[in-house]
Image: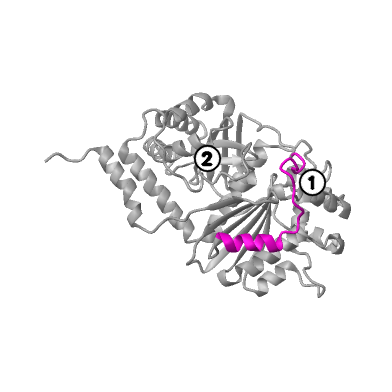
Amino acid sequence: MRRPGAWVLLAAALAAPALAAAPPTPVPEALDDGSELLVVPLPAAQTSALRLVVRAGGAQDPDGKGGVARLLGRALVDGVVDDKGTRLEELVRKAGGQLAVRSTPTATIYALDAPSAKLEQLAGAVIASVTSPRLGRLDLQKELPLLNTEPPEPRGPQMPWARLERLMFPPADPNSPPGGTPLSREKIEKDDLVGFFGKNYLTTAVTAIFAGAISAAQARAVMDQSMRLPPAIPEDRPSPAKLDPPSLPLTEKQAGPVHFAALGYRLDKGRRAACEAFARVADVRVAVAVGRSRKAPWMEVRCLSLRGQDFLVASSPARSPDPYAFPDAVEKAFRAAAGPPPRPREWIRIQQGAERALELLAEDPPALADALAAEAGVGRAPGSSLTDVSPVFFQPQLAWAQVKDLAKRSFREDRMFQLYLAPAP
């Protein structure tokens, strides 16, 4: 009996998920006031999440006063919400939730995790407080010391990427980088925070992301009742961020808390879809090739967005490989991976991996909300009113010509970066 061909097996594999539990589905919507609502309903979630993304970050700080965006975010989380002096963070904590603020050069993200039964109430309080703050009650003498005690860079898995970003995008003023320094923050006055809020906290800069036990209709009602910013016309945008092109080529070896090695390439605009497809194929092919050459015991290939720029990067968290042999091995593996298109079995494996990744995110609404917030913080594509969520909700495509073109144009020495970290002896 003749066995079914590979494409028949692929078609069967693509149809199989219909019998399994449906994956989470994002519900995006451009609201009338210019803001964006993105909801991922997960009815069984015990913990739900809100990420209120405001595309206004350290790159928009006034000259010589690095830290305004970060200080404003910290002040809004710590601000009072009623005449009794109750702080927003305290209100959330007493209801069993957690509230944090994360500042990047391009965005400020207000992150709420809460019991699902309390999400609508607490999300409404957070949105109302952030979009209509009581800045007149702000005490800079209280907030500045708290901000100065925060670590200068994220800890944990995000630390190497934050350091890479700082190296590739050095500030024009070393004494006033995005996020600021204790010295630059001392120059900040209350009027700077009020002015920054007025210029940059616009509805066209806001994306509200809900992930958890909430429907699109419920989330829309929360936005309708809680949003305090006046509607903005599409042309009304935050002041442009001062974003310079990445400083490339780059090779850097530094002491760090962990072993880490990364090598990657800057991509042209509009290459994100091809990058996502290639990264998932290369994640398998490059890992095998580099592992066989014993240049690194374990590799991960991913697409990375930093300050509106896209990069393809291979990284290894193991003991730093030989910085002389490692780049050559990875470059050769990248070029080989971009050669023949994936075989049907490879696409099946890639799709299964994408489905499993979504299943894991569906079990962790805060992590899913964080992944979507990272995309929303980069900014919307020109001419679009919605965030591109395809990197999170990835669907394998079989078009390979764009990938080959990406490799031809991007794998060049003048676009390359390398970062090696190792604990100091």
Q: Nearer the viewer, residue 14 or 140?
A: 14
Q: Are marks 2 and 1 in contact (CB under 8 Å)?
A: no
| Residue 109 x, y percent position in the rendering | 67, 54
Query: Which span of residues is magenta-colored?
Result: 216-240
Q: Residue furthest left?
A: 1
**Image position of 131 (left or right of 39):** right
Q: Position of residue 83 (x, y in %)?
A: 82, 73
Residue at image mark 2:
303
Q: Is residue 224 above or below residue 280?
A: below
In the picture provided, is 66 more to the left or to the right than 31? right
Q: Which residue shows up at 65% across the image and 33% down it?
A: 246
Say whether disc 2 or disc 1 marks the residue closer to the N-terminus. 1
- Give the CA separation, mark 2 to mark 1: 29 Å
Residue lying farthest to the front in this orientation:
32
Mark carried by residue 422: none
Colour mode of the rendering: one colour
Mark 1 residue element: loop
| Foreground residue among 408 and 238 | 238
**For residue 338, above or below residue 61:** above
229 drawn magenta? yes
Q: Is residue 414 left or right of residue 134?
A: left
Q: Amino acid at mark 2?
A: Cys
